[in-house]
Image (spheres, rainbow, N blue to C red):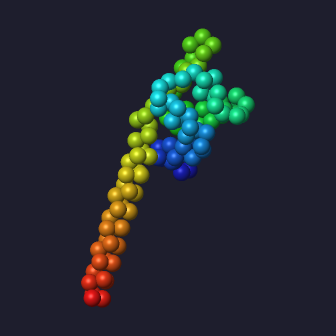
Amino acid sequence: MVQVQPVEVVFHALANPTRRAMVERLARGPAIVSELAEPFDMALPSFLQHLKVLEGSGLVQSKKVGRVRSVRLVPDRLAPAVHWLTKQHRLWEQRLDQLDAYIANMEKEDD
């Protein structure tokens, strides 16, 4: 069986625009579920499925006090995605720099 690595879990959770919007909202601070769900045009059970995916990825945590469930972002869980993206950014910057140098060299040879 293939084990899913944390970066895949994070990217899966962030692949959906609703979940990305939820993460963006929670970046400003914790929210209760009803407040978090308010801007989305969907039934609460559908919204809760999105919340479950985010919780499963570890990107958010929820806590129930009485009848009110509050949700907060766990920003450290973004680290695997940030690390992967940073690595890719460096790689492509290096490749583009090499291409620029190659083109500049070709232009010099044409002169």
Residue 52 in sight from this viewpoint: no
Residue that extends furthest to the bottom in the rendered view of this protein: 110
Vertical order, 65 against 8 (above or below): above
| x then y, percent, for residue 63 | 54, 20
Residue that extends furthest to the front in the rendered view of this protein: 111
Residue at 52%, 46% (x, y): give it. 11
| x then y, percent, for residue 44 | 70, 28
Image-based side of 101 in relation to 47, left or right: left
Residue at 37%, 55% (x, y): give it. 87
Q: Nearer the viewer, residue 93 or 103?
A: 103
Q: Quadrant of residue 65?
A: top right
Residue at 44%, 40% (x, y): give it. 78
| x then y, percent, for residue 36 | 59, 27
Residue at 31%, 83% (x, y): give it. 106
| x then y, percent, for residue 10 | 50, 43
Vertical order, 101 against 13 (above or below): below
Vertical order, 57 against 34 (above or below): below
Across the whole image, how many numbered discs are drawn on residues? 0
Residue 109 in sight from this viewpoint: yes
Q: Quadrant of residue 99?
A: bottom left
Q: Nearer the viewer, residue 111 or 11?
A: 111
Quadrant of the rendering where the C terminus is positioned: bottom left
